[in-house]
Image: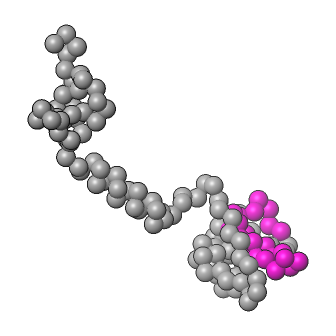
Amino acid sequence: MVVSPVRRCSRTACGRPAVATLTYVYADSTAVLGPLATYAEPHCYDLCAEHSERLTAPRGWEVVRLLDGSAPARPTGDDLEALANAVREAARPPERTTEGGSAGRSGDPLEGPRRGHLRVLRSPDN
C-alpha cells in the first residue's frame, strides 16, 4: 500500500488536498477552523478549501475562523472604496493658484506645472 504525502480532506468521497483543520471545543459549543495543523490529530478533521468555506455548525454553536497569515486576504468593501477614492484623487485636475499658474501639491516653490504623474522642477538659480 502506497501512502500519499499529501493530507486529504476528511469528508467522505472527497479526495482534494486539505488546507484547513477543524477542531470542536465541546465545552464551549465552538467549532474552530484554522490553518492546516502540522500533524494529523485523531480528534481533528482536515478539510479542503471548498468544504472549509461551506462549513456550518450545529444550531447554538459558534464557528471561529482563524486566519492564516500566509493566505492572501480577500478585499472588503472598505478596500474597494479606498481604491476608488485613490483613483478619483489621481484623476483630479491640479489645483490652480490665484495667479493662474499651477500650484504643486506640496506647495514647493521650485515645483512647476504637472503633466499627469510627472512634474517639472524649476532650477533654484532662477
**In the rendering, at what x and y percent does residue 26 appear?**
86, 79
Q: Is residue 6 visible?
A: no
**In the rendering, at what x and y percent does residue 13 appear?**
66, 85
In the depicted view, which residue is nearer to us: 25 or 124? 124
Q: Is residue 97 visible?
A: yes
Looking at the image, residue 26 lies above or below residue 94: below
The image quarter in which residue 117 lies:
top left
**In the rendering, at what x and y percent does residue 4 appear?**
70, 67
Q: Extreme bottom residue here?
A: 59
Kindly identify the residue that appears in the image at 73 percent across and 79 percent down. 62
Q: Is residue 106 left or right of residue 124?
A: right
Looking at the image, residue 111 lies above or below residue 87: above
In the depicted view, which residue is nearer to us: 107 or 56? 107
Kindly identify the residue that appears in the image at 82 percent across and 80 percent down. 29
**Residue 35 among those drawn in magenta:** yes
The image quarter in which residue 21 lies:
bottom right
Query: Which stretch did the figure color magenta?
Result: 20-41
**Residue 31 among those drawn in magenta:** yes
* Image quadrant containing the C terminus: top left
Kindly identify the residue that appears in the image at 17 percent across and 35 percent down. 97
In the depicted view, which residue is nearer to us: 49 or 1? 49
Q: Is residue 121 left or right of residue 59?
A: left
The image quarter in which residue 36 lies:
bottom right
